[in-house]
Amino acid sequence: MAIKRRTTNTGKILSLLLFMPAWIFAYSNHLFSNIDGSKLQINQLPEVLERDGRTEKLSIFELVILGQLQNFVEDEMGIERFSDPFWAGTSFLTNLLDSSRWNIKTAKRKLRKAIRQRRASDSNAIANKNETLSDLSQSFNFEIKGLDKESCPIIILPIGEWRTYRSFIEKTKSLPLAHKRLKLYFHNLMERGLEPLRNRNDSECSQITLIADMDGYIHIHSSGVKIFLDFIRQFHISYPGVLKIAYIINSTPDFLNVAQAVKTRVPWDLRTKSFIYTDKSFWQEALLQNIASSQLAPEYGGTNFFLG
């Protein structure tokens, strides 16, 4: 007959303390390892910290993931494959990881898709198509005005004034051609909107703050809703992590109905950064929390009359 040994609580505690360092070591090895088992040397972290002040706010785990993505860009993808060094900068990669919930596989997939999309659409050529799209720039105007408190450029889209969509379709006389030109124009809009980021000497900010003014918005044709959704998807693929925050102000009942109908078709990371306001007092307060009054025109609650 076998004799059963009784294990006291004290014995269990001693066993736990004895083997705990081994557990911690095993877990830390898992934490600091990539999917394929490759490891990032801890002595690389100071180099990362020196590149961008923003990384000082990251945890050790996030720094390791950032280092893995940098290695992926430099070793596997090759910097020469990027037509613009902006897309390989530390700040951009950090934003990309933010939008990927710090999942390295998701970030890599987004980066590959962005490169393919930008090559397919020839983004460099698109940035220089201002003359051929001059008629659209009058109908669908936008402005780059001021900087937020983190020195990110502010893009203002007066969407409520974009009432010429139907007349533009009728003038073009071809719905597919009209949509093709609109997609080209919106891509051109984003390339021009990113110019302030490319022209800066520092890499502290690689994002944009967006103000979409819906004042005057009326219901548009269903094909118009489709083209805007296509633009959102194109923006999400081509510029991952670039949107810092979007303020959708002066929202009308028509827009609220459209937003409610299409919200599930907007990528989650764009939805979580977009805030819809109807009451002026609320959206002005929200704007001033992140943007100094000197960087806003009076119509948006600011004090800078030169931006009006």
Image (cartoon, rainbow, N blue to C red):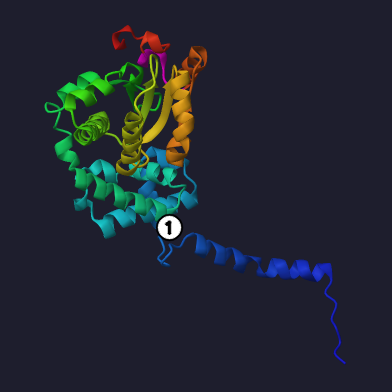
Residue sitting nearer the eye, 70 or 106: 106
Residue lying at 82% horizontally and 67% vertically, measured from the top left = 9
Above or below: residue 62 compared with residue 251: below
Query: Where residue 303 sits in the image (x, y, percent)?
Result: 38, 8
Residue annotated with mark 1: 42
In the picture as drawn, the residue positioned furthest to the bottom comes out as: 1
Residue segment shown in magenta: 290-296
Residue lying at 43% horizontally and 41% vertically, measured from the top left = 267
Q: Is residue 84 left or right of residue 263?
A: left
Above or below: residue 196 compared with residue 139: below
Above or below: residue 145 compared with residue 93: above
Q: Quadrant of residue 125?
A: top left
How crowded pointer 1 is (Cα within 10 Å; few <14, some 14-19, many 20+) is rated as few
Residue lying at 23% horizontally and 26% vertically, measured from the top left = 169
Query: Where residue 124 sits in the image (x, y, percent)?
Result: 16, 39
Give yes or no for residue 293 being in the magenta stretch.
Answer: yes
Query: Where residue 127 sits in the image (x, y, percent)?
Result: 17, 34
Q: Amino acid at mark 1?
A: Ile
Which type of secondary structure does the marked residue at label 1 adopt? helix
Residue lying at 86% horizontally and 87% vertically, measured from the top left = 3
Q: Does residue 76 appear anywhere in the picture?
A: yes
Q: Quadrant of the N terminus?
A: bottom right
Q: Quadrant of residue 273?
A: top left
